[in-house]
């Protein structure tokens, strides 16, 4: 009699966005496995999985963001250590699920003597032992080529018309509009809202050109200071974002509406686990 090995899916999460990971687990109909993350007095962390992952398909969820008491770099290191732990525990396949991919804006050298940090992050995932990366709306599609393995790019929105000046950090310029907006309701779409300077400047240009109302939509609500104040005082009447990043209570203003990406990520995880096509979730475009 031929023995068919039982396939197992293990879903684990770092501490940056447990609410999203819990929702993903609910859609998949599985329990989040316990990574047993221990933080030492020195600030070092150590995961030790409570369940065996030998021969299992392991998915490790972590958005790379700042949370109270922890930096973006802490969230990355936490995920890399969990990947290494899974590899050393003989997991069959390890997928790094990164709803928001850290350092994604540093995807090229804009001038001399700069790193390509997004490439380094990808290299660290490979070195830690990730077989696959899954992310939502990468800032630049070319990041997929930085990782020497499958990348599931769960694309959500296109980029807005803008330019980032040289020698600038968290600063972009809204240039102009294309087409007639007079008497129309307009929707601004971008991959992320960081300090909100671009989106608010674009809204001003639209209103100056006769728009009747302006909404803003973005996948990643980074909302670095002073984004919330800018949005609150802007001509934008509604801001729609997803929950790839946690939104603390102090940033939950009336204008902001949050849509969940848990179902999209859960469907992609299920497709990978079943060795099915992720592209079918999105109509067959831009996917592995």
Image (cartoon, grey):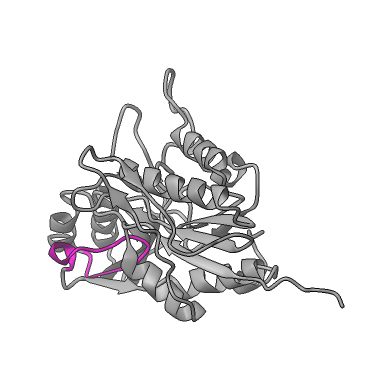
Identify the image quadrant of the N terminus. bottom right
Identify the image quadrant of the C terminus. bottom right
Which residue is at 59% across, 72% downward? Answer: 270
Which residue is at 19% across, 63% downward? Answer: 248
Examine the structure image and report whether residue 281 is included in the region drawn in magenta. Answer: no
Q: Is residue 55 left or right of residue 88?
A: right
Pick the residue in front: 280 or 36. Answer: 36
**Residue 54 coordinates in the image, percent (x, y):** 60, 59
**Residue 62 coordinates in the image, percent (x, y):** 40, 56
Q: Is residue 26 visible?
A: yes
Region of the chain picked out in magenta, as a range: 236-252
**Residue 271 coordinates in the image, percent (x, y):** 63, 71
Which residue is at 60% across, 53% downward? Answer: 90
- Total labels: the figure holds 0
Examine the structure image and report whether residue 248 is included in the region drawn in magenta. Answer: yes
Pick the residue in front: 123 or 43. Answer: 43
Pick the residue in front: 106 or 77. Answer: 77
Q: Residue furthest top?
A: 113
């Amino acid at each position: 009699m031929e023995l068919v090995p039982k396939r197992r899916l293990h879903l684990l999460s770092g501490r940056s966005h447990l609410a999203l990971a819990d929702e993903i687990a609910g859609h998949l109909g599985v329990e989040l496995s316990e990574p047993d993350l221990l933080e030492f007095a020195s600030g070092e962390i150590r995961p030790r999985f409570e369940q065996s992952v030998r021969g299992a398909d392991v998915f490790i969820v972590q958005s790379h963001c700042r949370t109270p008491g922890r930096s973006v770099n802490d969230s990355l290191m936490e995920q890399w250590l969990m990947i290494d732990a899974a590899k050393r525990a003989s997991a069959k396949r390890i997928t790094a699920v990164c709803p928001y991919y850290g350092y994604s804006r540093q995807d090229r050298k804009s001038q001399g003597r700069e790193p390509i940090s997004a490439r380094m992050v990808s290299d660290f995932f490979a070195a830690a032992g990730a077989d696959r990366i899954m992310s939502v709306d990468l800032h630049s599609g070319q990041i997929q080529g930085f990782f020497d393995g499958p990348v599931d790019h769960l694309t959500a929105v296109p980029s807005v018309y803008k330019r980032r000046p040289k020698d600038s950090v968290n600063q972009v310029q809204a240039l102009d509009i294309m087409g007639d907006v007079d008497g129309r309701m307009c929707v601004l779409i971008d991959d992320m809202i960081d300090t909100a300077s671009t989106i608010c400047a674009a809204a001003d240009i639209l209103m100056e050109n006769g728009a009747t109302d302006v909404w803003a939509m973005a996948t990643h609500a980074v909302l670095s200071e002073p984004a919330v104040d800018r949005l609150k005082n802007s001509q934008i009447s509604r801001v729609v974002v997803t929950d790839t990043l946690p939104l603390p209570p102090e940033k939950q203003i009336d204008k902001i509406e949050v849509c969940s990406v848990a179902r999209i990520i859960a469907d992609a995880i299920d497709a990978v686990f079943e060795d099915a096509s992720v592209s079918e979730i999105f109509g067959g475009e831009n996917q592995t």
